[in-house]
Image (cartoon, grey):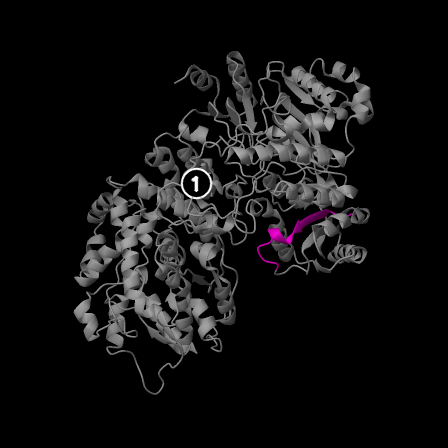
Amino acid sequence: MTDLEAALRTAVRGEVGFDVTSRALTTMDASNYRRVPLGVVAPRDADDVAAVLEVCRARGVPVVARGGGTSIAGQATGTGVVLDFTRHMNRLVSLDREARTAVVQPGLVLDRLQQAAAPHGLRFGPDPSTHSRCTLGGMIGNNSCGSHSVAWGTTADSVRELTVLTARGERLRLGQEWAGAPEGLRELVDGDLARLRTGFPDLPRRISGYALDALLPEKGADVARSFCGSEGTLGVLTEAVVRLVESPRARALAVLGYADEAGAAQAAAGLLPLGPLTVEGMAVDLVPSTEGLPRGGAWLFVETGGDTAAEARTRAEAVVRAADVVDALVVTDPAGQRTLWRVREDASGTATRMPDGSEAWPGWEDCAVPPARLGAYLRDFRTLLTTHGLRGTPYGHFGDGCIHVRIDFDLLTDAGVARFRRFSEELADVVVAHGGSLSGEHGDGQARAELLPRMYGEETVALFERAKSVWDPDDLLNPGMLVRPAPLDANLRFSVLPREPVDVAFGYPSDGGDFSAAVRRCVGVAKCRTTSAAGSGVMCPSFRATGDEAHSTRGRARLLHEMLAGELVTDGWRSTEVRDALDLCLSCKGCRSDCPVEVDMATYKAEFLHHHYAGRRRPAAHYAMGWLPVWLRWAARTRTAPVVNALASVRPLAAVAKRVGGIAGEREVPRLAGEPFSRWWRRRRPGAGRSGPGSPSGDLVVLWPDTFTEYLSPSVGRAAVRVLEAAGLRVALPPTLRGRAVIGDGTSKSAMALLTARRSRVCCGLTYVSTGQLDRARAVMRRTLDLMTPVLETSAPVVVLEPSCAAALRTDLPELLHDDPRAARLADRVVTFAEVLERHAPDWTPPAVNRPATGQTHCHQHAVLGDAADRRLREAAGLTGELSGGCCGLAGNFGFEEGHYEVSAACAEDRLLPAVREAPDGTVVLADGFSCRTQLEQLAGVRGRHLAEVLADGLGRS
């Protein structure tokens, strides 16, 4: 234990982390930069903060305050001690409805303040797109804005008083009329009044530099306002009194379509006299699908408010009439508005990939110009991009003249980094020429501070340095930011990554086969750190259960980054730190769809486990549950399922078996079916399938007998057969013998097959993939492809009832066997139960169940398969109500593994179990996944049912 660590542990009551994991999680924010801290402290209160400052000051160790870690300019990284306010100093202290103020701690997430204010008809005005994870302290440090700044301004406009600690331990309460000003600040201002009155551009989004002009007497000498945007370099915030605004009772959203972004930009300023709440712009490049948007190549999102829906709509329609547009749309439905706003909010992540999939990065993320100059500025910006051979797609706060953009900089080679510097210097001059600010929202940090003399001149920057010395004479707080900055091309986070591709098992087709590029996908926007899954969202259940950054998608990506870098995490694939962080990853694949840049942590986890345990003994659960298809097949062949069930019901025996198998003691072992599904199939139709009058005569479909349906829930398979045949479809099972097998009976008893092949079964390899046994998974998958070759020579779809198995066939199979073209062909054939009915029996009408439904959309269905067909099928059957999002928490082997029970149960309590408990009597509980049904049964005593079972029952009543 170092002297610094020991001193901090003695001095503070909060957590002190000098371990590899704590440091690795805070090496980066959402910027291009990386610094390795000495340690991390999560203070419990202001006294802890003062103690940290005292210990660090005595040793000359820098201190960096950090909120949600979503800063884009590098200001939330440092080489000393990082203060993490999100763990303890995250309270809403009080809310005064009459005064319209709130007292908050720096680690409070913005959405929590908004939720508390909403019942009073109030809200905090600024709302960055990261509102679900950014903190009030970080917003004050960056002077954040968000989409509603045309109506309610920046964070500085919403601050009343700030309580801060200086680096030398002085406690100050900042406000107007010099309240809380440190000694020497007033004298500094009085000595340079002329410069402060003339040297600062008059912009709605001037965030760059220190706001020293807020200290002018005619502006109320507002020390609190001047402190906003100082990026943690002047003092450490411990509490804030913020102003709330009245939230409109009703809102409407006018979406205005323009031919291109220049047209949208030129129109934005002209809409401001109409008093809109937002004037946001984005171009078609950032939109995955233009469905639901008006015609055009770029759009303005103009929100209006009113006391009634009619008033809000009238104002939105007035905006449309005043705008010269290609097309327009007015949306008053709150759900429709949320859907459109999600498109805009996800742009900060979507923009990190160009339309062709190549990488793009921040660096010139948020400069601002006068709104009337925006169109001209964008033309010059585009010209400069072309000159340097770069690409980028601007979007952002057009009404404030503030533009966000990610650019396809090459930050991996010396030549690319040199071009990054040249472009940055030239673009700074373009911004200044248009009367703009280098930062219009996210601060200067390391990305732009070096260029501030181009905007303010050397003398004003020297004044900034003097102000920093008044507040922090020892340069202890976040050194290298804003004044005396590090070069903008130093400390780049990509420089430590390997230059040669890493030898991996998966193909990573979207990343050119490069595992480093896959890990680089995480840019730190931290959507995975939300405390509730929005709508049908899933990501990230383990973070919501633990609140620990190490168990977020971003945290795991950071550890993988450091593993590849080899500087902090030094033992590569053998790293215990990475293993422990991935241990609570449920492999739900939620990040594959919910993360704006489609980080796929389930695949990364499987890859890591494959290498981590190569040549070594694995955990017992990997053998017990990873090889589950083998054990279940053995029990079926020996017809010992009744014996296994009987033994499992004897508690002492079950306890021993669970302990040996690495299974959580709290879990009950699922019962094996007395008759596997395929045995029922053969008994039901001993020949090559039914024929004759009344037999199905429609399309042939191949029903996949997944491990769970086959051995644990054959009732699902039987129900599916009944429904598919009622819809007129001819059902077959895959061959069980390799060779030129007959398709149709699931036994393949052709003479040639019997002579040239041995009996086997298809398997998606899911359990082997999820436990990282990728060599075994590939062998199983290749055997499956051999069996399925005759099927692939037909046009028959492959119907998979278990969502996890369907997802494995659609994604893991082609990505793991990327060298076998049959894998992609089989993946393309896979359809869900609802999809096959919709595509191959479009005229069939399902039975009228006419009951409310609850449950949860399977996480793999949400992330990989999609549930649109399921929604339409439920609606056609009269099953009303929405299924919840999130993850059931069992997630295949995860919830059964020893040590996972508490997190597994917590995930179920997040969305699934409350939805089931709140459902009225007579509600159908839908759960297409075996894990979901098992979790419901074991934690709530509720029987979940596959949609096929519900429809099959409906056939019996019709």
Residue placed furthest toward the top: 58
Tell me where residue 404 appears, x and y as whole percent: 65, 42
| Quadrant in which residue 64 is drawn | top right
Q: Quadrant of the C terminus?
A: bottom left
Residue beneath the point at 77% across and 42% down: 373
Please tell me whether mark 1 sits on a helix, a strand or a loop: helix
Q: Residues within 10 Å of mark 1 (few under 14, many from 20)?
A: many
Q: In this picture, which residue range is highlighted in magenta?
A: 275-290
- Give the amino acid at mark 1: Ser
| Magenta residue check for 488 | no
| Residue 819 percent coordinates (x, y) | 35, 55
Q: Which residue is at the far bottom?
A: 693
The residue shown at (66%, 50%) is 282
Residue 62 image position (x, y, % from top left): 54, 19
Q: Is residue 473 left or right of residue 4?
A: right
324 or 167: nearer the viewer? 324
798 is higher (above) or lower (below) than 79: below
Task: Say if the magenta span includes residue 286.
Answer: yes
Viewer-proximal residue among 917 and 778 = 778
Q: Is residue 152 visible?
A: yes
Q: Residue at x 47, y 56 (%)?
A: 862
Q: Does residue 324 appear left or right of residue 232 in this picture?
A: right
Q: Which residue is mark 1?
A: 516
Q: Is residue 29 visible?
A: no
Q: Is 889 located above or below residue 556 in the figure? A: below
